[in-house]
Image: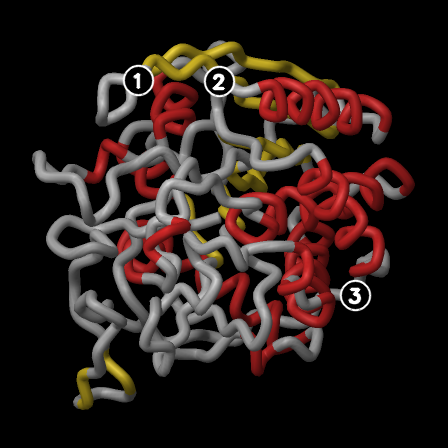
Amino acid sequence: MTHARGLSDMFRIVGSLLVGLAMSVSCGNRSAGVAAASKQAPSVSVTVPQFDADSAFSYIRTQTEFGPRVPNTAAHRECAGWLADKLRSLGAETVVQDIEVTAFDGTIIRGFNIIGSYRPESGRRIIICSHWDSRPWADNDPDRANHRTPVDAANDGASGVGVILEIARQMQMQLPEIGVDCIFFDAEDWGPGDDWKGEQREDMWGLGTQYWARRMHTEGYNARYAILLDMVGGQNATFYREGYSVRYASGVVDKVWDAAARVGSGRYFPNTGSCYVTDDHVFINTIGKIPAIDIVPYYPDCEQSSFGPTWHTVSDDIEHIDKATLQAVGRTLMYVIYNEK
């Protein structure tokens, strides 16, 4: 999923991290972000379907079997068709938004934003979303010989999609009270690496999301909030409160982190802050004007990347997906969705 993002270093991340109230810590090669305090929400009695991590894992495996889903390739086009067909088969009213965008290096990307809607008639809506494309280059791999090799993107792309498809499968069997839009954004990960000598800008990432935020799939579309899933299947992953999420949508952060505690996933969702991450949610907030948060991992002790050891490497494969992490994220999201009124 996620890629390096920020403004100044190889991870393109800026900001400051507070642990507790006073101690600053390093965020890989990036500065840390600011945490916000969580407030407990009142208990609500509702039947929440059981999330199935094995099913989510199978959806991730299927995506990786297409090969790297790099835009402008056959594997990318074939997987797009599969994703749209899968959402339709799971009962979603599905729209495929054909996009054409220009990457930082001048490449014209022809891609697909894929939107599946449940209760499309409802004005009470939320978004759950992920990018689905693969990084064209494993430019953070320890072996420089791999730096021009496409990434399998089992975690950095396919994991968020797999969790959302499993939630969609559950929604087909038991609709929530609100409308839910499942969005798979394209062309998120075709951004510059550390060998790029030109200007570094946040808008070089998340190209499909920027396109959607300016030309939403439904005229006059709005949603209460959006939850972005990025790299939600990694081994030993923890999801801190990301800086832009707290800035733009602190109430949604509270809602999700409280849900994680309620369903027993609290150890995966530490109640403290992390980096500011330039990801799809930034453009949903700033261009789309919809409050959006990012569930994205933070590995404070990983020297290779604070996104984890497989980020933008050839090791981002199905063998490094952890079903326990998928379960923690999936059941948290299910609780949020089915308790929304």
User: Residue 97's x, y, as percent?
Assistant: 54, 13
User: Residue 33's x, y, as percent?
Assistant: 24, 68
Q: Which mark is residue 72?
A: 2
Label 3 or label 2, whichever lies nearer to me, is 2
User: Residue 64's x, y, as percent?
Assistant: 67, 42
Query: Do labels 3 and 2 touch, CB within 8 Å?
Result: no
Label 3 or label 1, whichever lies nearer to me, is 1
Q: Which residue is mark 1?
A: 107
Taking the image as shown, residue 283 lies to the left or right of residue 232, namely left
Quarter of the view holding residue 41: bottom right
Query: Do labels 1 and 2 touch, CB within 8 Å?
Result: yes
Q: Which residue is mark 3?
A: 45
**Gap between marks 3 and 1, in whole Å?**
51 Å
**Gap between marks 3 and 2, in whole Å?**
47 Å
Q: Residue at x 58, y 31 (%)?
A: 183
- Label 1 crowding class (10 Å Cα cut-off): few <14, some 14-19, many 20+? few
Which of 47/260 is in front? Answer: 260
Label 3 or label 2, whichever comes before in sequence order: 3
Q: Residue at x 69, y 50 (%)?
A: 163
Amino acid bearing label 2: Asn
